Amino acid sequence: MDWTALGVSLRLGVGTVAILLPFGIWLGRLLAVRQFRGKVLVEALVTVPLVLPPTVLGFYLLVTFGARSPLGQAFQAIAGQTLPFSFEGLLLASAIANIPFVVQPIQRGFEAIPGDIRDAASCCGLTPWQCFRRIELPLAWPSLLTAAMLTFAHTLGEFGVVLMVGGNLPGETRTMSVAIYDRMQAFDDRSAGLMAATLLLVAVVTLMTTTMLSRQVRRRRD
Amino acid sequence: MTERQLTVSLQQAAPIPLDVAFTCEPGQVLAIFGASGSGKTTILRSIAGLHHPARAQVRVGHQIWCDTDTGVCLPPHRRAVGLVFQEYALFPHLTALGNVMAASGHRPRSERRAHAEALLERVHLTSLASRRPQELSGGERQRVALARALAREPAVMLLDEPFAAVDRGVRRRLQDEVAALRRATTVPLILVTHDVDDVVRLASHVLVLERGRVLAMDSVERLTSRPDLSFLREAFGLGSVFDAVVADVDTERRLLALTFDGGRLLTPLRDSTPGTRVRVRVPAREVILASAPPDGLSLHNVLAGTVAAMHEETTTGQVVVQVAVGRLFLLAEVTRDAVQRLALAPGRPVHALIKSVSIDAHRTVDGEP
């Protein structure tokens, strides 16, 4: 059992959620309530990571992060290390790969709020920010929970992107899913099986928590 | 122009054509009446700032809410409107009290709760203050919506088909509620409706809207006694609406005597006290014209007047005769044959025989004692 790998996986999961949630709320709400030109394109781009093979996504991210790209050079100048094969690079890659898992549930959540409710809020004298905080956010809350949990669970299971961008550095980029693959290659079936069971348990607990919490929210409301 | 008069002028070509201009004084209840798709709701939404027509001027007193000519346009949350939505649009995650408090943000934090509680008491919902909208009936939700609209202490009240989603009995009680609230608040009130009952019971003025244009706008009394509005005829049948005062309650003969500008009406007894102001509607179908005062009739009301105007309905061949009785105008619907036999023409003295009238005890228009 590789505890370090579990630590990396959990850090990556929590980190990805922390980065993506504010972004997902912003973009999800924007896509839900605003009509603008190019909206279809944005929606397609948001969904792309869902349909691309992880290796393809990983390849493009690796190219984008590389030492010859502006992003890679900027990161190296600031952090003094390369973006690929570092935890930071992995986190960024993971955030990009998980965009659909956070944006889509949140978009549906905000779309489910009737337009009249928003109009009523502004007619009650609430500023757009007050309306967002006091009316929209509480109403979209279950969808935020779903987005966070989906993203977390999916990050734990990500393999292709991690291997392409992060490689297999213990304590830095070796996540549970990579460690399992690693152990299997070494014919260490016992460790692989133990870690696989751990991941399965974490995933099931995460999804159960989500379902229970959102059911509780709904019950309180009905 | 009075200090808090609402002045509205809106023009747009799309998405639906709209070209209207009107004013509404504090204390008036203006009913915007028209078929669905005529632009009624768009007018309300434009006043509230939720819709932006190509050209718009919206003023309350000297305060400019919107003027496309000078580029002024306040967002909805800076316009003091109380808007009651058709489907109420209550906040589902907040209690009745929470909903009303949400619109009390202009008050200091410490006062908001008491302010909201007082409003819920006014709409008789104190015992349900901690319920969420899902736990309330349609009528109760409606009253929360009313209280919420009032909570902002609006300069203009806007009601969008407020009784469309409730059944008849609840509708009556809610109308009373609105009538009572209206008496307590002296702001312009605009009521969008397609129901004649709302107009008769609540409105002081009526704007008839057709395909985004003002077909007619006048006081209820004058508008309902016009013989030439076939729109009204199709929508709810012709018949003058006016105000009267209960002069006498005769329990022995089981009759009620009403006086109005120009005469006296007797109606079957109902629970009332002398001095009460009531709304009366005399449907044109219930009026018979006679050239001489008739004799030996079971009906009580024979009013002497003169023919003021006549209008022939091309579709039915019936003639609508407007009869001046004192300062009041009644409408009577007669056949073309009757017009010839009685030699009806403007200026001719006639007697109007009224078979029945409908009375509404809730006097809601301005000038109330």
Image (tube, rainbow, N blue to C red):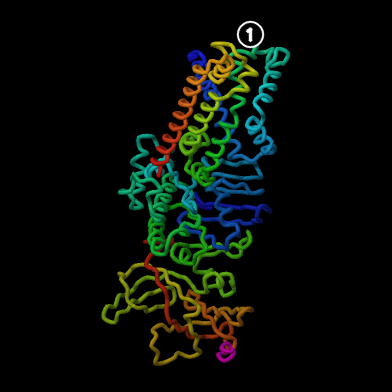
Q: Chain of mark 1?
A: A
* Front in this rendered view, residue B315 or B278: B315
Which stretch is magenta? B337-342
Is residue A190 found left or right of B70 in the rendered image? left
Asked if the magenta segment contains residue B341, the reply would be yes
Residue visible at 48% across and 26% down in the picture:
A200
Q: Quadrant of residue B65?
A: top right
Q: Quadrant of residue B353?
A: bottom left
Residue visible at 39% across and 41% down in the picture:
A219
Residue visible at 62% across and 23% down in the picture:
A160
Q: Quadrant of the C terminus of chain A?
A: top left
Give how far across and how far down residue A18 sits, in percent.
52, 23
* Front in this rendered view, residue B149 or A22: A22
* Front in this rendered view, residue B329 or B332: B332
Give how far across and how far down residue B215 sits, in percent.
61, 64
* Residue B87 makes an appearance in the image: yes
Using the image, determine if residue A163 lies above or below residue B235: above
Q: Quadrant of residue B299?
A: bottom left
Give how far across and how far down residue A40 sits, in percent.
67, 38
| Prevailing SS of the magenta stretch | helix
Give how far across and how far down residue A57 sits, in percent.
67, 25
* Residue B25 makes an appearance in the image: no
Residue type at mark 1: give it: Gln
Using the image, determine if residue A36 lies above or below residue B58: above
Is residue A93 found left or right of A189 in the rendered image? right
Please name the residue that numbered disc 1 is placed on. Answer: A81
Asked if the magenta segment contains residue A124, the reply would be no
Using the image, determine if residue B349 lies above or below residue B208: below
